[in-house]
Amino acid sequence: MLSQILYALPFLAAGFAVTLWVSLLVVVLSLIAGVLLGVGLVYGPMPLRWAVRIFSDTIRGIPILVLMFFVYYGLPAIGLHLPSFWAAVSALTLFKTAQVIEYLRGAVGSIPKGQFEAAMAIGLTFRQRLTYVIFPQAFRRFLPPWINGVTDAVKGSALVSLLGITDLMQAINQVIGRTYEAMPLYILGALIYFAVNYALSLASRRLERRFSFIRE
Amino acid sequence: MSEAPNAGPVLLDVRDVSKAFGTVEVLRSVSLQVKRGEVVTVIGPSGSGKTTLLRCVNFLESYDSGSIRIDGNEVGYREAGTRQRRRERDLAAMRAETGMVFQSFNLFPHLTAAGNIMLGLTKVRGKKEAEARSIAEHWLGRVGLAHKADSLPAELSGGQQQRVGIARAVAMEPKILLLDEITSALDPELVGEVLAVVRSLAEDGMTMLMVTHEMAFARDASSRIVFMADGGVSAVGPPKEILAAETTNERLRTFLARFRASHF
């Protein structure tokens, strides 16, 4: 059994790299898009707020799997053909973006209005108010749900295997397809996913402690 | 000090400013002038529009009609009678010319006392870190908190926080200082230390427009007192005149009587 695992390791490593790559893309892209749209939701003009609200509610109301199949199998109908890898990454990013929007709204919304006004009163521009006053305070509240979201993204990336992409999950299935030894490989896979996510939550806890200056 | 010996030309000129929140008129054609070096106090029952007026002066609040000028410059809107808001960058620059101190202090909790003061100096005034630091230390000294430069707001008492709030506002060298009920959130024994700071700034000739419920302070420190009721200016005059028990202004008399009843 151990020999089978050792034999499969290089193959699993390649899949694991794909899992990490997908996760990284999704996390980074959704962070950028989610923060921008989240700022739009909190501070933007009414039409923008509504647009972001509808986007976020719609996307969060759809199962990721449906979203992924929709992007891959549905969008070609309107002439948008995405390769399976990018279809999967886009769908996961859309989903994660909607979540980041909500984390941002919650975190920024928890900062008293007086902070924004005080920053206004000393003459900071909108961008400076966010950069130097709001975000540093909101960061601590944004972090825990966001890290949770990151671990979800790592776990959720396993769905890309359903579009035939050879990530860690798909690699495990393929090895099992050859060896018919499901249990040890699934346990191994679970351990790998767990190791990544546990490391993330440890890092998160350390970061949170560093930013715990705010009075409650 | 009630004569404001060094009062100069009109610095703040509020003309016919009106504002409504929905159907509620909070400001009804308010006009008010503050001369350079003057300390003008706005009093009045809650809901009379005092705070809203103050917030319009640095455009934390927009207004529906009328004009507010500081040193001849229209505050929130572009010239030529249009209701076109100034661009974000211009608004920020205008706001830097007015200092504001808040009832709830609103210090930035993630920055030290000195850091709170330095933020505007470095980001808005473009000063170097070292220069901003020495200015911050100077003003902290002025408000009696030189030893608290590196304390976070959470480590300071309410009175100390508010003194940092004042230092943060005046360090920007504003043309006018707006004080919005700055002692209302303080324990009674901490009010004195904050008012002492305000008094010393007034003695230095800082132009101030303040909303307060501290009548004794208003009487001693103001050049003029403005009494607001129902969103309008009901009476303006020197403290002696406004706070006189025999005033003929019905509203003012009621306000003062109620005030005396609850405070003495």
Image: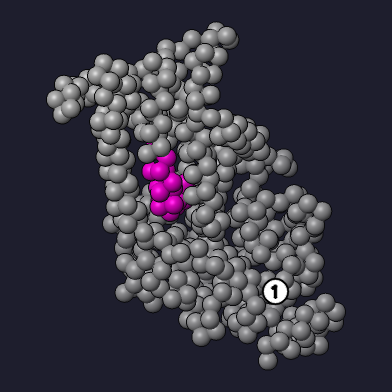
Q: Is residue A158 above or below residue A211?
A: above
The x, y position of residue B199, in whole percent, is 52, 78
Q: Which residues are magenta?
A: A129-150
The structure residue drawn at horizontal position 32% and vertical position 21%, both measured from the top left corner, is A173
Please state which of residues B97 and B27 is positioned toward the viewer in this rendering: B27
Kindly identify the residue that appears in the image at 36 percent across and 59 percent down: A212
What residue is at 63 percent from the left and 85 percent from the top? B216
Q: Toward the viewer: B158 or A13?
A: A13
Which of B125/A50 is in front? A50
Amino acid type shown at disc 1: Ile
Residue B28 in view (yes/no): yes
Q: Position of residue A47 (x, y in %)?
A: 66, 34
| Residue at the image point whose x is 80% and y is 58% from the top | B25
Image coords of residue A139 (percent x, y): 41, 49
In-image side of B169 versus A55 (left or right): left
Q: Quadrant of residue A184?
A: top left
Q: Quadrant of the N terminus of chain A?
A: top left
Task: In the displayed orientation, state which residue is furthest to the bottom.
Answer: B264
Say whether residue A144 is left or right of residue B82.
left
Eyeballing the image, is A127 above or below B49?
above
The reply to whether residue A21 is in sight is no
Residue at mark 1: B43
Q: Chain of mark 1?
A: B
Q: Main secondary structure of the magenta part?
A: helix
